């Protein structure tokens, strides 16, 4: 009996928050090389604050950088980190949907939830403190954004010259949302995104914390690959009515060189630990790195990986040019992009319109 084909391992590259003086050059170079390597997506970090001793004011906003990169790339996914603590649902839903339209269906949103005292200090106003009720705000925020993406059904813009009808009013769904943190009428003021929902990434919920933003996510960021193939971050999904558990994406930092000795020397130069729970640091030649990635995937520790590179020069290029071809030789990566959207890259179906489904269910009951 022939072996069952193994699903390609999703790979995304994390782009750090770079200083403004080098942000444009480094992002463009990384995007072009990553796309040449058929990497699934770039994850653009963002921090709406600066720290003590900073040498420059910081980078452009991640959503702006992603929009710029969308004009210079054709296939790679563009995932923007954004914290509900510093946005309103309508504005963020509109920006991510706009990126999906601009990029032709390649947008994603990484839900940032970590506390940040400096960023909090830039977003306080009378009666509002981003540090207060952060988890509850996020739990309401994420499904509200997804609902806003569904306020226009596919095909709502009919543009019928003969009848003079521009839109089909029956396919528009104002929200009239009223919750503990937000009052949002809707609808969004642009058409449903090409992907239906841009891909949503969220951090795994800590044990015992109950539902978190990951419950609405397409992919969960789980930190370093857990030992023994544990996937506790997604276990709750199958027990709460979701048809499919989200993908799990583990965080790794490779130190790559053509030979093991060279890789060990580079690792000693940066003094990185083997892993601290946040991500796994792995050093070696291309076969060594591919072995670890393949072993984690086969053990069920993760479906895919987000790769954050060390400050050492040339590490993104080394991983792209040496490790990715080794994984392809083993049949663990696509040889080229085979879908036009980020959902397609990750093997995710385009979601149906949940507001249309709710409207139909209400009509059937009445």
Image (cartoon, helix red, strand yellow):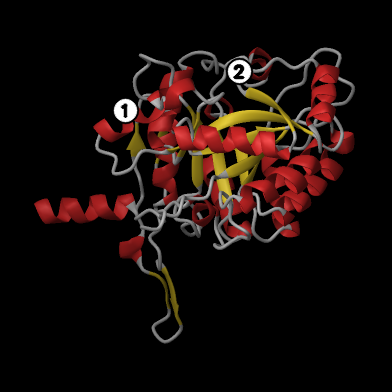
Q: Total of numbered circles in the picture?
A: 2
Residue at the left extreme of this rendering? 366
Q: Using the numbered discs, state the Cα–Cα distance from disc 1 to disc 2 in whole angstroms.
A: 34 Å
Task: Residue 163 in the image: state x and y as whole percent.
Answer: 39, 83
Residue 202, numbered label: none
Query: Up-down: is 130 above or below 37?
Result: above
Mark 1, residues whose alpha carbon is within 10 Å: few (<14), some, or many (≥20)?
some
Task: Residue 108 in the image: state x and y as whole percent.
Answer: 56, 45
Residue 44 in sight from this viewpoint: no
Between residue 275 and residue 20, name the one nearer to us.
275
Task: Residue 193 in the image: state x and y as whole percent.
Answer: 50, 56
Between residue 178 and residue 335, name the one nearer to us.
335
Mark 2, residues whose alpha carbon is within 10 Å: few (<14), some, or many (≥20)?
some
Residue displayed at 78% across by 16% down: 51
Mark in front: 1 vs 2 = 1
Q: Secondary structure at mark 2?
A: loop
Residue displayed at 30% across by 63% down: 170
In the displayed structure image, the side of residue 129 where residue 103 appears, left or right: right
Q: Which residue is mark 1?
A: 236
Residue displayed at 36% across by 50% down: 174
Q: Which residue is mark 2?
A: 124
In the displayed structure image, the side of residue 199 where residue 76 appears, left or right: right
Q: Secondary structure at mark 1?
A: loop
Quadrant holding the N terminus: bottom left
Between residue 269 and residue 100, name the one nearer to us.
269
Query: Up-down: is 188 above or below 47?
Result: below
Residue at the front extreme of this rendering? 1
Query: Up-down: is 229 above or below 71?
Result: above
* For marks 1 and 2 on the same chain, the one whose residue lies earlier in the sequence: 2
Residue at the bottom extreme of this rendering? 162
Residue 66 in sight from this viewpoint: yes
């Amino acid at each position: 009996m022939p072996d069952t084909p193994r699903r390609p391992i999703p790979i995304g590259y994390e782009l750090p928050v770079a200083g403004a003086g080098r942000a444009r050059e480094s992002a463009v170079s990384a995007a072009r090389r990553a796309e040449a390597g058929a990497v699934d997506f770039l994850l653009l970090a963002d921090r709406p604050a600066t720290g003590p001793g900073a040498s420059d004011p910081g980078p452009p906003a991640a959503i702006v950088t992603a929009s710029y990169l969308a004009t210079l790339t054709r296939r790679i996914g563009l995932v923007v980190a954004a914290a509900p603590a510093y946005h309103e649902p309508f504005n963020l839903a509109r920006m991510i949907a706009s990126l999906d339209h601009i990029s032709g269906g390649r947008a994603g949103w990484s839900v940032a939830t970590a506390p940040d005292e400096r960023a909090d200090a830039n977003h306080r106003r009378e009666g509002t403190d981003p540090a207060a009720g952060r988890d509850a705000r996020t739990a309401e925020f994420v499904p509200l954004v997804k609902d806003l993406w569904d306020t226009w059904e596919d095909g709502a813009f009919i543009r019928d010259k003969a009848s003079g009808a521009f839109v089909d009013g029956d396919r528009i769904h104002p929200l009239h949302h009223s919750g503990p943190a937000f009052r949002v009428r809707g609808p969004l003021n642009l058409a449903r995104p090409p992907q239906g929902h841009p891909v949503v990434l969220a951090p795994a919920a800590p044990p015992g914390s109950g539902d978190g933003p990951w419950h609405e996510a397409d992919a969960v960021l789980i930190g370093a690959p857990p030992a023994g193939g544990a996937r506790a971050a997604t276990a709750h999904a199958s027990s709460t009515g979701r048809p499919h558990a989200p993908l799990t994406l583990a965080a790794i930092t490779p130190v790559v060189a053509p030979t093991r000795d060279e890789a060990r020397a580079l690792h000693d130069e940066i003094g990185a630990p083997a892993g601290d729970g946040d991500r796994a640091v792995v050093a070696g030649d291309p076969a060594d790195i591919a072995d670890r990635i393949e072993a984690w995937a086969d053990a069920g520790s993760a479906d895919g990986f987000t790769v954050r590179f060390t400050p050492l020069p040339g590490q993104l290029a080394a991983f792209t040019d040496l490790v990715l071809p080794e994984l392809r030789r083993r049949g663990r990566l696509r040889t080229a992009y085979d879908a036009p959207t980020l959902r397609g890259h990750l093997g995710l179906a385009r979601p149906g319109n949940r507001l249309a489904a709710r409207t139909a269910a209400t009509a059937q009951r009445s």
